[in-house]
Amino acid sequence: MPETPEHFPDIVRERFAKVARSPDQESKFPVGPESAKKLGYDEGEIDDLPASVTESFCGVGNPLSLGEPAAGQIVLDLGSGAGLDSILAARRVGRSGKVIGVDMTQEMIDKARQNVHVLGITNVEFRLGNIEALPLEDASVDVVMTNGVFNLCPDKSKVLAEVFRVLRPGGRFQMADILLHDDVTPEEVATKGSWSD
Ligand SMILES: C[S@@+](CC[C@H](N)C(=O)[O-])C[C@H]1O[C@@H](n2cnc3c(N)ncnc32)[C@H](O)[C@@H]1O
């Protein structure tokens, strides 16, 4: 498939469907529990989770290290993947709170739903959708967190506008992502094999 903007969502879906199905075959970027530990997640918390929760983790940082959600809060996880951050947030907000994960890859949504089912967690819901048009009401969440999805979104302004639409006044946005410097040359870009190198 050509890497043109109109094909981009399909390329991203295809790539992350594979990370959901066969995480051990991903070789271009770090995936799994050891990567989470290197990024600063609590080792004991990661080791205590079933492999299916951590094996497809492909975040680039630890958004919860920027602030712990409080009991009773509503948290939105953009590009929730197999659900690791959503599950950790669900433990923090407790039964009076709620976490909503949104991801556009069906295989990730299926895996995340299965993961919360296995853990018996009932305060998390995963919705299939594009974060450029969030399936949520205005001013309906206390915390938006995201781990490794902004760099995959061609229209970042649209995503940011959605984040601020759904955040309540005084809400918090906690983001972990990768940045591209302004001074990267076309030659350097051309030497990269794909967007995820
Ligand atoms: C790098 S992975 C990170 C997954 C998860 N946050 C984690 O830390 O393991 C990026 C995720 O974002 C999803 N994604 C990418 N672009 C998206 C978009 N525009 N809308 C919704 N999900 C998107 C992918 O399907 C993938 O599951």
Image (spheres, grey):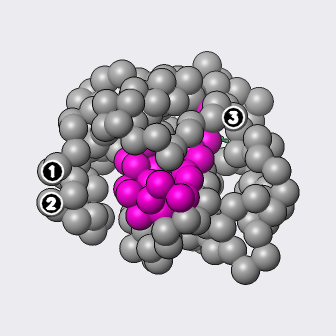
Where's residue 11, x and y in %?
A: 59, 28
Asked if the magenta segment contains residue 108, the reply would be no
Answer few, some or many: residues within 10 Å of disc 2's Cα (few below 14, many 20 plus, some between 14 and 19): few
- Describe residue 182's horizontal placement relative to residue 167 as left or right: left
Q: Quadrant of residue 89?
A: bottom left
Asked if the magenta segment contains residue 97, the reply would be yes
Depth order, front residue of 11/35: 35
Q: Amino acid at mark 1?
A: Asp
Where's residue 54, x and y in %?
A: 28, 42
The residue that mark 2 highlights is 44
* Range of residues picked out in magenta: 82-104
- Up the image or down, 29 lies above or below 180; here it is above
Compare marks 2 and 3 and give the one earlier in the sequence.
2
Compare marks 3 and 1 and give the one earlier in the sequence.
1
The residue that mark 3 highlights is 129
Answer few, some or many: residues within 10 Å of disc 1's Cα (few below 14, many 20 plus, some between 14 and 19): few
Query: Contact, CB < 8 Å: mark 1 with mark 2?
Result: yes
Ligand 1 within 8 A of label 2's CB?
A: no
Where's residue 3, x and y in %?
A: 64, 31
The N terminus, quarter of image:
top right
State the CA–CA distance, disc 1 to disc 2. 5 Å
Q: Amino acid at mark 3?
A: Gly
Query: Contact, CB < 8 Å: mark 3 with mark 1?
Result: no
Ligand 1 within 8 A of label 3's CB?
A: yes
Query: Residue placed at 58% from the left, 65% from the top?
Result: 73
> Which circle marks residue 47 in the picture?
1
Q: Amino acid at mark 2?
A: Gly
Q: Tell me if I can see residue 11 in this picture.
A: no
- State which image quarter holds ligand 1: top right
Depth order, front residue of 59/108: 108
- Describe residue 101's horizontal placement relative to residue 137 as left or right: left
